[in-house]
Image (cartoon, helix red, strand yellow):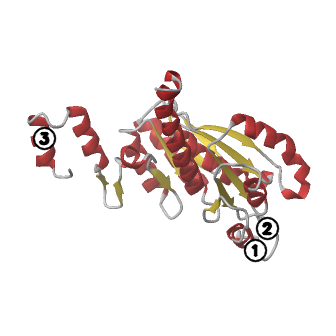
Amino acid sequence: MENLEEILAAVAGGALSPADAAGHLRQGEVRYLDEFAVLDSGRAARKGVPEIVYAPGKTPTQVAKICASILKGSERVVVSAPTPEQERLLRETLSETLPGIPVRRAGRSLVAGSGEPAPTGGRVVAVSAGTSDLPVLEEAVAVAREMGVAVESFHDVGVAGIHRLAAPLEEMRAFDPDCVIVAAGMEGALPSVVSALVAVPVVGLPTSTGYGLGGDGTAAILGMLQSCSPGLSVVNVDNGVGAGAAAALIANRAASYRERLEPDRALGPGH
């Protein structure tokens, strides 16, 4: 039901509630900003993933204007991989147009806005092979948290000292995640190891860390794609946004399923 007249007629006839009508309208809502951006403000309602500003390739002014426009209708916005100049102008613009709006670092990204997203009950674990992988992994964590997911993180447990993974693995199982994100550079082996040891989907996040040939993430992504460990899916190199969104969608679907099961469990067998 995408035609505005059909939606209004359905509300007038009692076939559609005003709240449901608003939901239909939000799913297709776009906003035009100057001549350089069309904001998909209905994405979160339609898909469950908020609109995220990809900063590379944009001017500082474009990033600042886009974020300010989004924040007029949303509580927060994530900015992926901004430059120092983009960050500086964004902070200045928000302090002038929307005073009091905080801006914080999340790895290589920024989160602008106040408050916290409503929790969904979804659970994600985020694991880094090395400290150098943290900027990209923390971007994935920021996106997942913006989608209402609870995240537990474990860092610097790569295969160069695989015994470091033992204790985090026990904590991971106790947390009982719906999905696991594993970020690794170099040869990208850790996601395969983790995938072989957990009973939930794993999202491999290759990073552009490493020496010489393949240090741009080529070796890491190829190693993950060639994994013989079932249940491992892979996003592109340094794609923290994609990893966070995929893991959170899985977690939120699992949480929704658990919520539907709760009444049945409360009734007990035979009902």
Give the number of the mark in front: 1 or 2.
Answer: 2
* Location of mark 3 (residue): 10
| Residue 187's disc number | 2
Q: Mark 1: which amino acid?
A: Gly
The crowd level at tag 1 (other Cα within 10 Å; few <14, some 14-19, many 20+) is some
* Location of mark 1 (residue): 214
Where residue 7 appears, as percent x and y from the top left, is: 16, 44
Q: Mark 3: which amino acid?
A: Ala
Instruction: Decide which of 185, 34 is in the foreground and name it.
Output: 185
- Distance between the Cα atoms at labels 3 and 1? 57 Å
**CB of mark 1 within 8 Å of CB of mark 2?**
yes
Label 1's element?
loop
Label 2's element?
loop
Question: Against 250, is 231 above or below?
Answer: below
The crowd level at tag 3 (other Cα within 10 Å; few <14, some 14-19, many 20+) is some
Q: Which picture quadrant has residue 45?
A: top left
In the visual, does 65 lie left or right of 255?
Answer: left
Label 3's element?
helix
Q: Earlier in the sequence, mark 3 or mark 2?
A: 3
